[in-house]
């Protein structure tokens, strides 16, 4: 028995030595496989070096097209005769302001929604980091959308049901004046059961329906989003990494938990709407002046 146990112990030690010795070899082979996988697909008839160069050129071309597409997006730029040297308006949103507001911080990487993957920059300390290079042009494009809606005399409804949202959504409503409404507590059935709330006359005129709804916390207002979908009302929302961005029509990838991010986003959109309202009133004033001029000429 002693001889057999001694031989078994020697065999066990030998296997440990063999495993330890072969471990670097397996690691190096894994690294080689990983390096080969990063070179992309190899077409028949071309070498590995040619495939690597071709894939590198394709990646550079894709980045060039992406940058060109971002530069061609319509941006909201407030019109001012004498702009200040260092503007503090939220419409002047930059990567620095978004980063300072905490917009890049997402939830735990294990909770990241699969559909949110295109908006993820990377992972750090177990958290998903949102790509602000995509958030910034999306925010500016959404601001242009709000400006155009208000310019066409549309109604923008801002919904923020958290306690910290109350002040910022009412300030946004003041900027939009009669083209905006703010809701801090959503009542179910406001859109799908409007006759009970407003009577039959607003329903016949469709004056109860907003033209655009902005949600500061869409994942906590799924019932309201369903009502907007049922009434074919487009929606805008700050979508975090644990939420499917497809729940709203125009998602803004950012940290939903940060009140500074919410204030930056709603301030940007409301000031864009304020600019659209100013342009509409200016256009109406110009048309009224032209009509008065025609009436005077007709009298003569």
Image (spheres, rainbow, N blue to C red):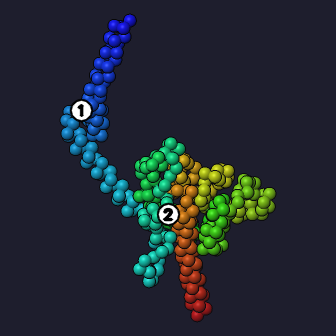
Residue 158 sits in which quadrant?
bottom right
Residue 269 appearing in the image:
no
Is residue 190 toward the left or the right of residue 250 in the image?
right
Of the numbered discs 2 and 1, the one sitting upstream in the chain is 1
Is residue 110 toward the left or the right of residue 36 in the image?
right
Residue sitting at the far bottom: 300
Image disc number at residue 269: none
Image disc number at residue 44: 1
**Front residue of 247 and 35:** 35
Residue 96 location in percent, x, y? 42, 65
Q: Residues within 10 Å of mark 1 (few under 14, many from 20)?
A: few
- Mark 2 to mark 1 CA distance (whole Å): 50 Å
Is residue 288 toward the left or the right of residue 96 in the image?
right
Q: Residue at x 49, y 73 (%)?
A: 89
Residue 4 location in percent, x, y? 35, 7
Q: Residue at x 53, y 62 (%)?
A: 261
Dividing the image into 4 quarters, which one contains the N terminus?
top left
Residue 251 location in percent, x, y? 53, 55
Dividing the image into 4 quarters, which one contains the C terminus?
bottom right
**Front residue of 120 and 58:** 120
In the rendered picture of this protein, how many numbered marks are placed on residues?
A: 2
SS of the residue under disc 1:
loop
Residue 238 sits in which quadrant?
bottom right
Q: Residues within 10 Å of mark 2 (few under 14, many from 20)?
A: some
**Front residue of 129 and 249:** 129
Residue 45 location in percent, x, y? 20, 33
Is residue 196 toward the left or the right of residue 239 in the image?
right
SS of the residue under disc 2:
loop
**Front residue of 176 and 113:** 113
Q: Residue at x 26, y 29 (%)?
A: 25
Residue under numbered circle 2 = 101
């Amino acid at each position: 028995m002693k001889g057999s146990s001694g031989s078994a112990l020697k065999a066990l030690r030998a296997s440990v030595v063999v495993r330890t010795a072969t471990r670097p070899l397996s690691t190096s082979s894994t690294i080689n496989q990983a390096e080969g996988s990063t070179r992309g697909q190899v077409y028949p008839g071309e070498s590995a070096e040619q495939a690597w160069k071709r894939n590198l050129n394709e990646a550079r071309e894709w980045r060039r097209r992406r940058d060109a597409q971002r530069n061609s997006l319509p941006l909201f730029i407030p019109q001012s005769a004498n702009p200040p040297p260092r503007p503090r308006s939220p419409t002047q949103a930059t990567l620095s302001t978004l980063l300072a507001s905490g917009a890049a911080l997402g939830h735990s990487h294990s909770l990241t929604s699969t559909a949110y993957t295109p908006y993820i920059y990377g992972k750090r300390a177990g958290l998903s980091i949102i790509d602000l290079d995509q958030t910034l042009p999306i925010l500016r494009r959404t601001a242009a959308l709000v400006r155009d809606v208000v310019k066409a005399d549309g109604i923008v409804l801002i919904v923020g049901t958290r306690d910290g949202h109350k002040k910022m959504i009412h300030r946004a409503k003041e900027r939009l004046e009669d083209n905006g409404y703010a809701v801090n507590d959503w009542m179910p059935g406001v859109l799908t059961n409007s006759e009970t709330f407003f009577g039959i006359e607003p329903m016949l005129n469709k004056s109860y329906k907003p033209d655009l709804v902005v949600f500061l916390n869409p994942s906590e207002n799924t019932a309201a989003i369903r009502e907007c979908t049922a009434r074919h009302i487009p929606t805008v929302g700050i979508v975090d990494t644990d939420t499917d961005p497809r729940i709203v029509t125009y998602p803004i990838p950012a940290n939903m938990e940060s009140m500074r991010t919410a204030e930056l986003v709603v301030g940007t959109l409301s000031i864009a709407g304020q600019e659209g309202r100013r342009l509409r009133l200016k256009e109406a004033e110009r048309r009224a002046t032209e009509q008065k001029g025609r009436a005077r000429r007709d009298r003569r």
